[in-house]
Amino acid sequence: MRRGPEPAGRAVLASPAVPPSPLNARHVPYIAMTADEKSPAPDLVKGPDGWIAYRTPGPYDRHPGIDVLLARTEGTPGGKVDGGRLSPLRQFHCMDLRRCQGCRRPATHVPKKGTLWVLTEFLETGERSAITGPTDMPPSCARCALRRCPVLEERGRQLLWVRQAPVYGVFADLYPPPKGIRVLEQLVPLRNERVMSAAVATRLARDLREVTFADPEFVAALAAQLGKP
């Protein structure tokens, strides 16, 4: 890997340029894309170092710590929220800075317990979800952890304290040479530089470790302390 994982607390997409409008989104959940945002097909070229790049480069193309190419979006957040699509920029932003996936405020952290995460209890297949291992879901604040959510109401809600969550890799679409035929939705570990060089990352993945279940009543008390959003 050309660069290692970012240092703790490093700002995502650090640049003197003004951040694009998607980082100013106010809707809930913050990481979800809206009807006014689109995901264009990438126009890619292969650089002299063998890594793919956008034909017309921009200041927010690559993650500053991993150096992987990020999927682009077009448009400004607005219209109906699409819970089935996540904004790559905002998802990385929350994962990098331990921000709440719902409201983008700091995720709830309790000493000796860890950071609050919310996962579904069951997968779409009906199997029980794992509470450890790689995930593309950012952490949560206590208030958003208890918000009404159609997905969580249908598939169950697990409130978790996570003490360790190092960066694992990225979920990405791959454009491998020589023909660059697209391979969708692959989980690429950081250590796999060859695959990462052909990846357009859509989501950052963290490896959840030292996980314990959170008491819903305790989380509700923490949410009450946060007050209204």
Image (spheres, helix red, strand yellow):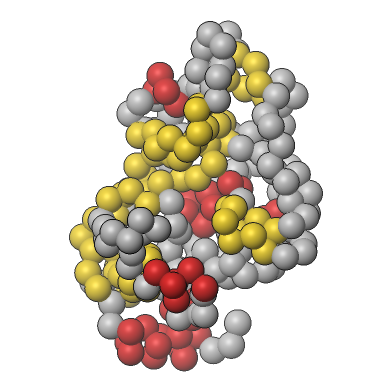
Q: Position of residue 124 (x, y in %)?
A: 40, 58
Q: Nearer the viewer, residue 21 or 7?
A: 21
| Residue occupying the far front of the picture | 125
Q: Nearer the viewer, residue 29 or 106?
A: 29
Q: Residue at x 60, y 14 (%)?
A: 46
Q: Position of residue 126 (x, y in %)?
A: 33, 61
Instruction: Let me know if residue 224 appears in the view.
Output: yes
Q: Position of residue 158 (x, y in %)?
A: 33, 71
Q: Nearer the viewer, residue 213 or 38?
A: 38
Q: Quadrant of the C terminus?
A: bottom right
Quarter occupied by residue 33: bottom right
The answer to whether residue 3 is left or right of residue 24 is left
Q: Residue at x 28, y 83 (%)?
A: 215
Q: Residue at x 29, y 55 (%)?
A: 208
The answer to whether residue 128 is left or right of residue 48 is left
Q: Nearer the viewer, residue 184 or 111?
A: 184
Q: Quadrant of the N terminus?
A: top left
Task: Say if 65 sits above or below 99 in the image.
Answer: above
Task: Say if 80 sits above or below 16 in the image.
Answer: below
Task: Say if 39 sits above or below 196 in the image.
Answer: below
- Say how many tags the image has: 0
Q: Position of residue 157 (x, y in %)?
A: 37, 73
